[in-house]
Amino acid sequence: MALSYWRMLFISLLIILIAGCSKELQPEQHITNKGNEHQTYTATQTDPTPQEKWNTLLGDLKNISVITKEGTEINLDKQEFLEKFHQLPFVEEAKEDQYAYDYMVLFWSQTDEPAVVSLTKQGVKWENIFYRGDGATKFSDYIEVNVAKEFFKQVNANRITVISKDLDQTKQFSDQGIEELFSMLQQAQYLKGGPRIPYPLFPYYVLEMDMAGKDIIQVEVLSPTLISVGQGNEKMYYQTVDSLYTPLMTEMPITNYSEHSFNHLFKATALQVHDYTREIAQVYDLKLEEMTELEVQSTIHQVVRTLKGGERAVSSKPNSPVYKLVFAVEKEKILIDVYEDGFIYQGQFYKKSNVINGINQMLGNEGIFQKKP
């Protein structure tokens, strides 16, 4: 009798134990009564939270890199990233529209397949969920800034071609020139944001850097110490320690041009625009008191570029110009009448469609031109 009692007790405890384990391993069943109806719902196992997924991602992290929109891969400091983003940085889910992503952040673990976080100005996409909000913005800003800081330290060009868009010349850098130039680029400091007036100075050098056949990176030289690198629709700006014009002009010197050349206009030190688009003509001057000397020069150079590329043509004299440009070159004033489809320079008509668009944009910039009283 005693043996039967203890045996029954053991079996009962075993059943309770199995039932308890089953509750942990099997989905719970919830039964609700509504009148005479009986409905049974089966709840699925609890999925990991986004923070738990993020913890797993960082826990397995081997290294982290970023692919830019131009296809360049930049490695980030793993330890710094872990310290800054140990908490999931983006939490505000949002509806995803159709965006072209600027960066792809790759989280490399011991496996061959990296986890991917896609970044755009509008938000962040991770695990097929789109996020907005302050956290997503801070995460995107961190990636953007650190990619820019590491950019010239990690890219390695085996060939550099210098192009002058104003001189219409192209030349490949010598090996010695590449070494000197690349050393200057690696010391350049990233500038958050950009210049107020982003027009390049004459002779508008552009560096085409061949990344061992993988891709071509273009670097615009905006001034002797200011450069930009395009990343999709955005640009990264850098300040160099020394003037890039020293090695560039050694490779591609500037020659003097005749007074009949468009390049003669690049010597202008002042510019005035007469606007005839209204009933009463208006005159615009550059805001010399608010602009640096480089900003004045680069603005004049950009206006000259709107004229370059015009083709000589025979044209009946138009009734009246849309604009009159007055360039001050040394002690001379050079007048150019601008029409809808071209302009007259030194008595010759040059055909160029949409020539007034660039002038319209600059006149609309309150930081560049002002109406003359």
Image: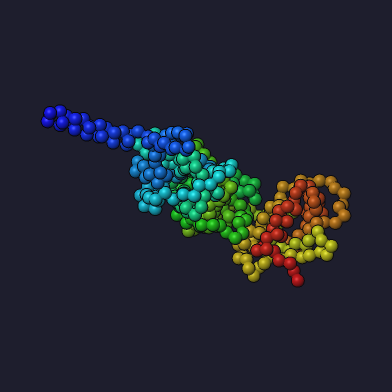
**x, y percentage for residue 341?**
79, 49
Depth order, front residue of 58/197: 58
Q: Quadrant of the C terminus?
A: bottom right
Q: Is residue 33 above or below residue 344?
A: above
Q: Position of residue 133 (x, y in %)?
A: 51, 52
Q: Position of residue 328 (x, y in %)?
A: 72, 63
**Residue 209 % position (x, y):** 52, 44
Q: Residue 209, can we see it? A: no
Count of picture labels: 0
Can see residue 299?
Answer: yes
Name the residue nearer the viewer: 158 or 187.
187
- Image-based side of 190 in relation to 99, left or right: left
Residue at (78, 55) in percent of width and height? 338
Q: Residue at x 59, y 42 (%)?
A: 98
Residue 331 vertical position relative to residue 42 in the rendered view, above or below: below
- Which quarter of the figure has residue 303? bottom right
Question: In the figure, is residue 291 to the left or right of 129?
Answer: right
The residue sitting at 86% across, 52% down in the picture is 318
Screen quadrant of the N terminus: top left
Residue 309 or 112: which is nearer the viewer?
A: 112
Q: Is residue 197 left or right of residue 45?
A: right
Taking the spot 55% from the left edge, 45% from the top edge, the residue there is 95
Check the image and report above or below for 340 versus 268: above
> In front here: 165 or 23?
23
Residue extending furthest bottom?
Answer: 373
